[in-house]
Amino acid sequence: MKVVKRDGKKAEYNGEKIAIAIRKGFGGAISNTVYTEEDHNKIFLAVTYDIEKNYEPDSEIPIEEIQDLIESELKKNGYLDVYEAFSSYRNRRNESRKAFANRQHKLTKAIESLSLKTAREEDSKRENANIDGNTAMGTMLQYGSTLSKEFAKSYMMEERFAEAHDSGQIHIHDMDFLPMGTTTCCQIDLDNLFKDGFSTGHGYLRTPNSIGSYASLAAIAIQSNQNDQHGGQSVPAFDYYMAPGVIKSFKKNFKQAISEYVDLLEIKKVDLDNIIEDIDKIKTIDIKIKDFDKYYKSNKDLEKAFKKAYDIAYKKTDRMTYQAMEAFIHNLNTMHSRAGAQVPFSSINFGTDTTPEGRMVIKNYLYSLDAGLGHGETPIFPVSIFKLKEGVNYNEKDPNYDMFKLACKVSSKRLFPNFSFLDSPFNKQYYKKGDYKTEVCYMGCRTRVMGNVANPDKEITPGRGNLSFTSINLVRLGIKHGILKNDEPDIEGFYKELDELMDLVKDQLLERFKIQCSKKKYNFPFLFGQGVWIDSKELSDNDDITPILRNGTLSTGFIGLAECLKALIGSHHGESEEARKLGYEIIKHMREKEDEYSNKYKLNFTLLATPAEGLSGRFTKIDRSIYGKIEGVTDRDYYTNSFHVPVYYDISIVDKLEIEGPYHALTNAGHISYIELDGDTANNLEAFEAIVRKMHDAKMGYAAINHPVDRDPVCGYTGVIGDVCPGCGRKELEGIPIERFKEKQCEIASVTCSCTE
C-alpha cells in the first residue's frame, strides 16, 4: 500500500508513523485523565482495522484520509479532549503551510536588520541581556532565533497569538525556543547533583570531595543546565550546598596537619590510624580539641600538635574557601554556553546557613565579590541575592547579623548582592522551620516559583522553575480607553479588553505547555536526565513528562503600569492617590484572574512583574507609530518596568517603597523594586542598611539598591572611584596616552575607529 502525501509524492505505508501521530495526539491534550499505552493501542488497532477493511493491499491512501480515520476513532471511543487537540493541531498545520510562505518577506527583512544593524539600533539583538548581538556567534544565534520565531508563528501557534504578538498587544518571550519545547528556568538542587555525581553528556563527574570541587561542579551544573533551557539558572541555597565541601576540605587539612606535626615533633606512641578515623567522623569545622583528649591525656607534645594542627587546618580551609568562591565567580563570568555566544544567566541565593562552615562560605563569597574580577571589574554573574530572615541575620543578636552587615558593605560598592525578604507574608507562608528547601528563592531576573496548586505537597523551592511567560502591553489599553480618546476614562472598557487579553495569553500559554509536554526525557539530557527538575530522575525515555512539568509555572507578565495610568486618567501612581488606588486595583484584578485559571486547570498560573530589557522599547516603538508621541506616555524610548514608579519621577525613598511594596504580594511569579541613589553609599553604610530595612518593612519580596559605579579607562577597575583609582593609583586623566584617550571617547560614542592616526 502507498500513502499519498500532500505534495503528491508517494511513500510506503508505515504503521509506526500512525502510532506516533496517535501518541502525539494523546500527548497534546490538556486533561486531568492520565492516558496509558492501552489507550494509544486501542485507537491504533481501530485505525489499522479500518484501513485493512476499506483499502486493498496494493492501493493508495491519501494521508488526509488516515487523519480522518484517527479523528473518527477518537470521537467514537469517547476521547473527546484528545480529538479536539488532534483536530485543532491538524487544522492549524494546514493553515501554517500557507502562512509560512507569506512570512518570507518579513523573515528576509529581519535577517537584513540582524546583519546590518548594531545591537544599539536593533531591539531583537539585545532581547537577552547576556548575549552580545554584535559578535559573530551572537549574530549566528540571532539568525537561528529569527528563523525559529517565524516557524513558530506559522506552524506552532494559532494565528491570533502571532497577530497579537506582532501588533504589540502582547509579547511572547523566548518565542525562538517554542518549537524546541524548552522550559524557561530552574532552581537547581545542587545537593541532589552532588550526592552521586553527575554526567554532562561528555563525561561523568564524581561526587566532589573538597570545597574547590564543590564550587567548580556548581559552575559546571549551571552551565550544563543552561543548554537545556531558554532562561536562567538559580541556586536556591548556595551556602547550604557548599558547606559540606568546607567540612570535607577541613577534614583533609586536619588529617594532613596532625600527621605532619606528629612526624615533625617525632612524637612516640601515637595511634594515628584511630585519630584519622575519628577526624573522618567530624560533622562540623567548629570542633573542640578536648574531644580528642583520650589520645593526648599524658602527652603534652601531642596536645600541642592537636592545637597547632587545628589552627593550621582552619586557616587553610578558610583560604581554600576564598579561592573556591573566587574561582566560582570568575568561571561564571567567563564560561560559555549555547554555542559560545553567552555566559550562563546565573543567580545564587544565600545568607541563612548559620553553621560555621555555612558562614565561612557566605563570608568568603562576599569577600570574593568585593574583590571583583581580574581588573577589579564588578562581576555581573552570578546575580547575588542575600536572603534576610528575622532570627537568622536581620537583628543585631541574630547569628548571621554580621553577614548582613558585610553584605551591605559589599553591595554599597558592587551593586550586589541584592536582597530578598523571607519574612514578607507571601514568602513566610511557605516556610517550615529548619527546612531551607521551603525558603523562597529568586532569579536575578526576578522570577519566583513557590506555590503549587498542581501538587500542594510539593511547595518547595529546589527542582522547580517557570515554564514560559508572556507579557501584556498595559499602555496600549490605557491609551485606547483613556482620557486622550474619551472625555472620561472608559474603565469598564479597559477591564473588558484586559480580560480578553488575559484569556488570550492563558490560551497561548496552554498551547505552549502542550508543546512542552509532547517532549521526552531524552530531549533534555541534563535537566531531566540528571534529575535536576523535580521528580524527573525516575522517568524512562518515553514516559509522559506532563505530570512533572505541572510543578512549574505559567506566567502572565505586564509592562508599563505607570504610562498606562498616565494615559488612562492623566497621572501615574507616584503623582496622585487616585492613580495609586487604580494601579493597585488593576494588578489585583490580574492576579485574581491568574488564581481563577490555576483553580480551573490545576496548573500554576502566576502573575509576573516583567523585566523590561528590550521589550519595553519594542512596545513603545509600535505604539508611537500608531498613536504618535504622547507626553508622559510614548515620548520616551521605553515604558517603565512593570509596576515601578518611573525612574525619572522625583520621589522620596520612603514614598517609592510604600507605593511599590503592595505589588510584590500580587506578583507571585516574581518582582523586584529598585532604589536609585546618587552618592557614594560606601561612605554611609548605616544609611544603606536603613534602606534595606525600609524595604523589609514595606513587605517586599526582592529589592536592590542602585548607585553610581565608575570604571577606570586604563586599568579597568570598576567601583566607586574618588580622587585616586583604587585599582592602579592613577589620578583622573593622569597617564593616559592621547591615542587611548581618543579611543575612549569613540568607545563612549559607540564609533568603530582607529584613533592612532
Image (cartoon, rainbow, N blue to C red):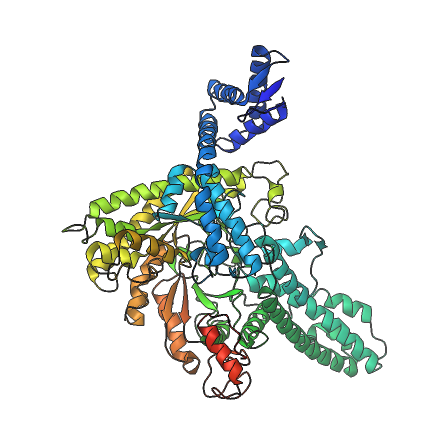
Give the residue displayed 21% in from the left and 48% down from the top.
491
Measuring from the top left, give residue 545's x and y in whole percent.
55, 39
Measuring from the top left, give residue 207's x and y in whole percent.
70, 57
Measuring from the top left, give residue 746's x and y in whole percent.
47, 74
- Is residue 659 positioned above or below 536 on the image? below
Query: Dividing the picture into quarters, in which one does residue 447 lie?
Result: bottom left
Quadrant occupied by the N terminus:
top right
Q: Nearer the viewer, residue 86 or 616?
A: 616
- Is residue 681 positioned above or below 484 on the image? below
Residue at the far left in the pictured view: 487
Measuring from the top left, give residue 352's x and y in whole percent.
51, 65
Give the residue displayed 35% in from the left and 57% down from the top.
642
Q: Nearer the viewer, residue 309 or 167?
A: 167
Q: Is residue 553 visible?
A: no
Residue at the far front in the pictured view: 757
Q: Is residue 37 left or right of residue 396?
A: right
- Is residue 651 positioned above or below 464 on the image? below
Query: Dividing the picture into quarters, in which one does residue 661 lie?
Result: bottom left
Q: Nearer the viewer, residue 488 or 438?
A: 488
Q: Is residue 676 visible?
A: yes
Q: Nearer the viewer, residue 643 or 119?
A: 119
Give the residue displayed 25% in from the left and 42% down from the top.
496
Q: Is residue 743 left or right of residue 580?
A: right
